[in-house]
């Protein structure tokens, strides 16, 4: 009897370890084996100079459309025309909402659904008082030390001109697509894409376009960012979070601070914000974040590989690890961030109104309505009104990793960047491509540039730049993807 009591847990332990090891042994690489590719002819110096010229044009977007420098965008259009003569002789170009551009490269087989490449013309302004921190001025368009420097090199003129360089090179080679290719370049991505991407997508939808896939910026080739993997990881965004801002307002009768009532406007809104912070949305190791771990897991060293092969057992531990850092925690749950707090003008006067703005990013699979219900139920105080600040966006659908389109993209990345591990992932921010969900079932978000930890602050920050060598590779990637998708 005693012996059996001891044996049972030992047997169970042996069984458990056996399952862990067996799953690890069969946890094989999901990376595609690919053939080498034939590069297109690219004159690196000339291409870098063309991108530098585009950087010099200050196509800054503004929330207030009245403030937009229309002339700068028209100057960029003119530059594109002179820089890419073959593209402009071969493709049709339309202007949408005045400043957005839609190029159409008709395929020889109209029965094939088209592929859409997205990029945006606009850039964010340089933050006041940071101009002098730049190694080379943000809008000087300097090519030096092997880099093209300036606002927009990474976000997103590098992609825009890279796509056109690729098409120009393909036309020069005599390539004609079987599948129609569209290039759609919005002009207001940084302020939501309501006039550019949204209207362009609406037009394509009206024309009955159902694309093979859509490709936009979003994620990139990360170096040293995905823990446990030594190889660079090319992350393909398969979904992006939704966006919702709500204003929490309390209105009371103001008065003198010498005789305060038990409930003040500031107190009520403070409690509402504190309650929201204390009651986060539940986190789950699911969707694109889990897909990512299962894809990079086989490339990890032991014992991390054993852990990733057995998420059924170690899921809660991995989740705890990911939840300990804000950037990874945000991939597992909808987030709540108080961003504005306003009340009071004088130290001895009770304000009649207090207002806070809370910004939420909603996980795919959840909804704006559900998020609002969580906010209202958590605050549970009808003296605090909850109002949506438009525009709000639902989270995107999740693009398939089993679709032929994903394979086309995956294969093209592996061919041009054979050292990289390819994996799907969730995009935490927003891109123009969210407006294309009615036009394409599969919308992928991938920028073909390598990014290390120190490159992340360059987006919307100081010393944005791209290496000339990496820019040429990006052009090769776009050219190959056009061939693989439409050849
Ligand atoms: Zn961008």
Image (cartoon, helix red, strand yellow):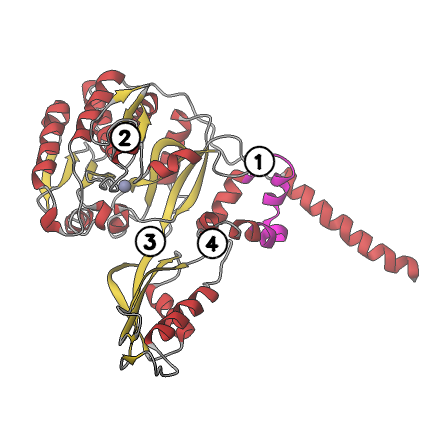
Q: What residue is disc 3 on?
A: 396
Q: Which residues, given as a range, are shown in magenta?
A: 297-318
Q: Is residue 215 above or below residue 34?
A: below
Q: In the rendered structure, which disc, 2 or 3, sits on the residue that comes first in sequence?
A: 3
Q: Nearer the viewer, mark 2 or mark 3?
A: 3
Majority secondary structure in the magenta region: helix
Q: What residue is disc 2 on?
A: 482
Position of residue 235 measured from the top left corner of the image (x, y, whole percent): 42, 38
Q: In the rendered structure, which disc, 4 or 2, sits on the residue that comes first in sequence?
A: 4
Q: Residue at x 91, y 57 (%)?
A: 3
Check disc 1 and report its element: helix, strand or loop.
loop
Check disc 3 and report its element: helix, strand or loop.
loop
Quick one: 117 or 380, which is closer to the camera? 380
Position of residue 365 measured from the top left corner of the image (x, y, whole percent): 40, 59
Query: Is residue 113 shown left or right of residue 362?
Result: left
Q: How many labels were placed on the picture?
A: 4
Quadrant holding the C terminus: top left
Q: In the rendered structure, which disc, 1 or 4, sits on the residue that comes first in sequence?
A: 1
């Amino acid at each position: 009897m005693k012996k059996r009591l001891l044996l049972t847990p030992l047997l169970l332990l042996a069984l458990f370890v056996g399952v862990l090891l067996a799953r690890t042994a069969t946890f094989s690489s999901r990376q595609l084996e690919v053939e080498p590719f034939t590069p297109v002819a690219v004159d690196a110096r000339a291409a870098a100079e063309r991108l530098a010229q585009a950087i010099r044009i200050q196509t800054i977007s503004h929330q207030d459309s009245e403030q937009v420098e229309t002339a700068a965008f028209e100057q960029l259009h003119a530059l594109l025309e002179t820089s890419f003569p073959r593209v402009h002789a071969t493709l049709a170009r339309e202007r949408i909402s005045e400043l957005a551009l839609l190029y159409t490269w008709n395929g020889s087989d109209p029965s094939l659904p088209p592929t859409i490449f997205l990029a945006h013309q606009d850039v964010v302004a340089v933050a006041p008082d940071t101009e002098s921190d730049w190694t080379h001025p943000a809008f000087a368009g300097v090519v030096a030390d092997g880099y093209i420097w300036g606002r927009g090199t990474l976000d997103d003129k590098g992609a825009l001109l890279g796509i056109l360089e690729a098409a120009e090179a393909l036309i020069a080679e005599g390539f004609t697509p079987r599948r129609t290719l569209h290039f759609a370049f919005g002009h207001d991505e940084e302020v939501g894409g309501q006039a550019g991407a949204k209207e362009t997508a609406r037009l394509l939808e009206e024309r009955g376009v159902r694309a093979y896939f859509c490709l936009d910026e979003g994620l990139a080739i990360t170096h040293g960012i995905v823990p446990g993997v030594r190889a660079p990881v090319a992350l393909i965004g398969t979904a992006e979070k939704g966006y919702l801002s709500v204003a929490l307002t309390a209105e009371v009768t103001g008065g003198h601070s010498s005789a305060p009532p038990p409930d003040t406007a500031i107190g009520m809104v403070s409690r509402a914000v504190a309650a929201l912070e204390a009651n986060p949305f539940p986190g789950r190791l699911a969707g694109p974040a889990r897909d990512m771990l299962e894809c990079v897991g086989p490339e990890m060293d032991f014992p991390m590989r054993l852990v990733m092969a057995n998420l059924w057992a170690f899921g809660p531990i991995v989740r705890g690890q990911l939840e300990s850092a804000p950037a990874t925690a945000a991939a597992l749950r909808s987030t709540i961030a108080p961003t504005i707090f306003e009340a009071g003008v004088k130290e001895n006067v009770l304000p009649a109104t207090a207002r806070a703005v809370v910004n939420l990013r909603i996980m795919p699979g959840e909804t704006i309505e559900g998020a609002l219900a969580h906010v209202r139920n958590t605050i549970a105080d009808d003296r605090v009104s909850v109002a949506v600040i438009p525009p709000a966006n639902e989270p995107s659908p999740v693009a398939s990793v089993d679709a032929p389109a994903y394979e086309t993209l995956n294969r093209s990345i592996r061919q041009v960047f054979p050292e990289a591990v390819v994996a799907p992932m969730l995009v935490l921010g927003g891109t123009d491509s969210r407006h294309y969900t009615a036009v394409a079932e599969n919308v992928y978000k991938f920028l073909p540039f390598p990014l290390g930890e120190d490159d992340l602050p360059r987006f919307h920050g100081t010393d944005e730049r791209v290496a000339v060598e990496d820019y040429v590779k990006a052009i090769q990637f776009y050219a190959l993807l056009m061939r693989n998708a439409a050849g």
